[in-house]
Amino acid sequence: MSTYRNETPSSVHTNQVPALEDYDLVILGGGTGSTIASWTFASEGQRVAVIERKYIGGSCPNIACLPSKNILHSAKVATYVRHAEEFGVKTDGFRIDMSAVRGRKRAMVSGLNDVYRGKFKETGAEFILGSGRFVGPKTLEVSLVDGTMRRLRGTNVIVSTGTRAALDPVPGLAAAQPLTHIEALELDRVPGHLIVIGGGFVGLELSQALRRFGSKVTVIDRNDGLLHREDDDVKEALADLFRDEGIDTALNARVKAVSGKSGDAVTVVIEQGGKEKTLTGTDLLVAAGRLPNTENIGLESAGIELTDRGYIKVNERLETTAPGVWAIGEVAGSPQFTHVSVDDFRVVRDNLEGGNHVTTGRQIPYTLFTDPELARLGLNEKEAKARGMAYRLFKIPMEQVLRARTVSETRGFLKALVEVAGNRILGFTAFAVDAGEIMASVQTAMIAGMSFTALRDAIWAHPTLVEGLSPLFSSAPSLSADTQANTPVMAHGRS
């Protein structure tokens, strides 16, 4: 994810055209995938430049993935303290110091920035802080922070300008100056009542964290459930979690109007079930999707076309419509995860080296970092049924995982889909403590094409969370409805 924003450069242009500088590779936007690309190609002796408007390393280490997980962990610590007596620890009360929470996050970001600067120096890749735009084929003009200009031409160019938070054209919404995830991670106070528009990853993670810091929280979502594309058991588990933590939800709701100012007092009018309702709070967070950063960067000057949704049009090799220009990450319409941006880099790298690496058929895992986490890989039941695929379903509650009992984290479940005619794992879902770590072992098995029985019969260290894969794949499976009548269920999951 890059933080390259679609803003018109604000520096003063002069009539003098700067001299053209030639590079082997010029990268517009400094997200994770493009940053790794710069280091890799520069280490191989190529002349490489990265143009980034604000953040070294892009958004992931500065304002998104890593800072948010830092804040979420502080919120989890607050929950541990709040329930300290359950663990035999007596406390005399505590308070949340959001300035200190923010300070811990800022210290981590500063340390990461130092690492990135060191890596640029070590590899010889050039980091250029400024706003870039295409002025011709494979040629970019850069407005530097000191008001001067540079003009760069690359033998190859990679565009990785990322996305930004979407702001729907709701009356009064922009005037209310709502928080996005960027501002929410910089809060030095606990909001009195946070209203969150959007029940996706960002909205859910920050809703839980700020509730644990002490805010009253209400989540508005236009769909019939949080993460509505997930299986019903996942949606129900998330709904139960939020209910138990005192987070209110307004589902099947459309925001009609907003008034007031976030940080002071806001009023949100929603339509729900054909009726209007009014919600009042102190702060407003918008987390209702993303928009690509493709405006005002001169793409038309370079012959780079867009899709009907505004993303850069690429083929399965991540080539744009302009020869020698590639696009990676979110701006190319790739799934919005940093690890996908990194794999996009691998695709481009291999193709630049003469290979034929494509993005189709990739196995993409993801984790929602609520507490418990939601981790998923491959097919879920909804997707399998939509494809008419038969499957065996293995599922156990986390209470059956002994390690979860030792840490009082028994909420949730593990489940896996296995093909009926063989033993190949089709998909895995975990709503559990450290679900993302558990998923990694299943992903390794799926990459290797291993039978589910290899995980069932493995000698796992005891007591660990991944040990739960043995009881999971030893449980009696059920069959998808399409095949129940014709396929016998195997006792205890044994093949």
Image: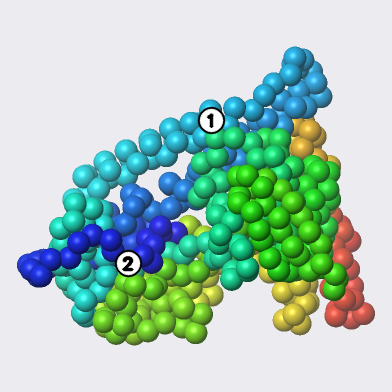
**Is residue 162 in view from this perspective?**
yes
Q: Secondary structure at mark 2?
A: loop
Quickly name the residue at label 1: 99
Q: Pick whichever, 109 or 210, lies toward us.
A: 210
Q: How many marks?
A: 2
Residue 14 image position (x, y, % from top left): 13, 66
Q: In the rendering, which numbered label is found on residue 8?
A: 2
x, y percentage for residue 116? Answer: 32, 44
Disc 2 crowd, CA 10 A, few/some/many (<14, 14-19, 20+): few
Q: Is residue 76 left or right of residue 232?
A: left
Q: Give x and y (percent) for residue 376.
A: 66, 59
User: If the image is split into quadrants, where does the N terminus sit?
Assistant: bottom left
Q: Disc 1 or 2, which lies upstream in sequence? A: 2
Instruction: Determine the image quadrant of residue 402.
Output: top right
* Dot 2 amino acid type: Thr
Q: Is residue 43 above or below residue 244?
A: below
Residue at 87% in and 76% down: 481
